[in-house]
Every structure is written in structure tokens, then in C-alpha cells.
Amino acid sequence: MASVSRLSRRKDASRWPRMSSTFWAVVLLTALLVLYCGQLAAGTCEIVTLDRDSSQPRRTIARQTARCACKKGQIAGTTRARPACVDAGIVRKKQWCEMVPCLEDEGCDLLVNKSGWTCTQPGGRVKTTTAL
């Protein structure tokens, strides 16, 4: 008991500051907002990393990683050259062109071994995508 009274007499001793209920409400709401913003909405994707390698002539190798929060029965895929949630059966059967991976003016063709697809632009340029 003597130590408590000594602390209260010290000039450098301080008590916990009193905070209003509004302060604690703001702290709680801020924490919830930070937690919520870290989550993706169901059925959406975001690009996490994108690496490009143009060291070879006439060829650019691009690798991207996406984070998706897909609904039941869906899996991460590509729609219109963007990451998207697609029907899991498309990926299981490797029928890549069914997920409409190419842009509107491009044609889609499966690779011979079904490891990916090609998107052919009207000018003849070809983009090849292989799935991991």
C-alpha cells in the first residue's frame, strides 16, 4: 500500500488518460474498416503481382498472380484478359476458351496439349497463355 501512495506523490507519475466513449467508438470503427478493406468481395479478383520480361526479341513474357474470392463452384480464371472467377468445370475440363479469356476482337484457340490458349488479334499478333 505504501508503494501506491509513493507513486501518487511522484511528479512524473501519470494516470491513464480518460477517453470518451466517442473516442473508443472511433477506434473500434477504424479497426473494423481496416479488417474489412483487407477482404475481397465474393466473386471478385485483384492482381497481386505483375512481372514482364522483354529480354527476348519480338517476345514479351508476362507473369501475373491474382488473388480471388470466388463463390462456391467457381475458381480463379481469366475473362476478357482480366482475372475473374469462372465456373470450376471449365478449368477441370481444360476448355479454356469457354471462360472467354480474350478481348472482344480477338479469336481464342486451345493449345494442342490443352495447357493453355492463344488469343489472335485481327492484325495477326498472337498472345499465348499457359495455365499453371
Image: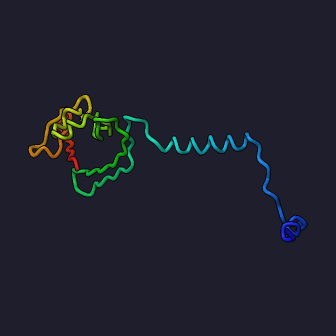
Report the residue at 27% width, 58% height from top. Answer: 55
Q: Is residue 131 left or right of residue 50?
A: left
Q: Outermost residue toward the left? A: 112
Q: Observer-nearest residue: 115 or 59?
A: 115
| Residue 107 to residue 19: above or below | above
Q: Is residue 11 left or right of residue 102?
A: right
Where is residue 15? Give x, y as percent. Answer: 81, 58
Q: Outermost residue toward the front? A: 1
Q: Observer-nearest residue: 6 or 60?
A: 6
Q: Is residue 87 left or right of residue 16?
A: left
Where is residue 84? Give x, y as percent. Answer: 32, 37
Where is residue 64? Give x, y as percent. Answer: 32, 49
- Which quarter shows the N terminus? bottom right
Quarter occupied by residue 3: bottom right
Quarter occupied by residue 81: top left
Q: Outermost residue toward the top? A: 104
Where is residue 117? Give x, y as percent. Answer: 17, 41
Report the residue at 18% width, 41% height from top. Answer: 92
| Residue 116 to residue 121: above or below | below
The type of colouring in the image is rainbow
Picture mark count: 0
